[in-house]
Amino acid sequence: MSSQKIVRCQLRRDGSDGPAQVRYVPLEIFGLWEHLMRSKHGFEVLEPHASLWLDMEDSPEAAYSENHYDRVTQVTAFVYSQRDDMFTRARRYFHSDEADSLKRIFLSHYGGDESRIQTQVHERTGIWIVREAIAGRA
């Protein structure tokens, strides 16, 4: 069974009173992602919580009740770089209910020159485990 450390957070336009959107970001890049969302895109990043994402290969949801996990889809794009003459991997995680619409936005960052080799996309369904907050920590 594959697992990945993921941060679940809320994302909202800076200064907006509107509802926030949920995002799932790999822990290893969360600091950089948070900085870019704040400084380049003008978003607030609220309520970050780290936990594990588990793929559905072995049906791990059977070990948890429905309110102890979020259904999260892993989307991996293998993008060809003509400059480097090789493929690179870009991987993102989306709440499964929003995966189709957010996947289009994600893949739009890798569009462009029609002569390029086609981007290959793979999806895996999984769950993000809801962990109880530790007393004294936010």
Image (cartoon, rainbow, N blue to C red):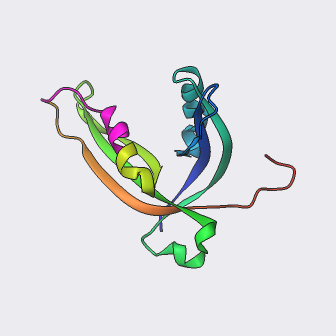
2 displayed left or right of 89: right
Q: Nearer the viewer, residue 5 or 11?
A: 11
- Residue drawn at x 44%, y 56% as measured from the top left: 97
Q: Nearer the viewer, residue 27 or 138?
A: 138
- Looking at the image, which residue sits at the far top? 40
**Total numbered labels:** 0
Establish if 64 lies above or below 117: below
* Among the 4 quarters of the image, the one containing residue 42: top right
Residue 119 x %, y %: 23, 41
Magenta-highlighted residues: 103-114
- Residue drawn at x 63%, y 67% as measured from the top left: 68
Establish if 88 lies above or below 137: above
- Residue drawn at x 62%, y 26% as measured from the top left: 14
- Residue drawn at x 61%, y 34% as measured from the top left: 31
Residue 44 x %, y %: 63, 31
Asked if residue 70 shows in the view, the reply is yes
* Among the 4 quarters of the image, the one containing residue 83: top left
Residue 128 x %, y %: 56, 60
Establish if 104 lies above or below 36: below
- Looking at the image, which residue sits at the far bottom? 62
Q: In the image, is residue 123 part of the stretch drawn in magenta?
A: no
Establish if 70 lies above or below 103: below
Residue 48 x %, y %: 66, 44
* Among the 4 quarters of the image, the one containing residue 67: bottom right
Asked if residue 73 shows in the view, the reply is no
- Looking at the image, which residue sits at the far front? 17
Q: In the image, is residue 113 part of the stretch drawn in magenta?
A: yes
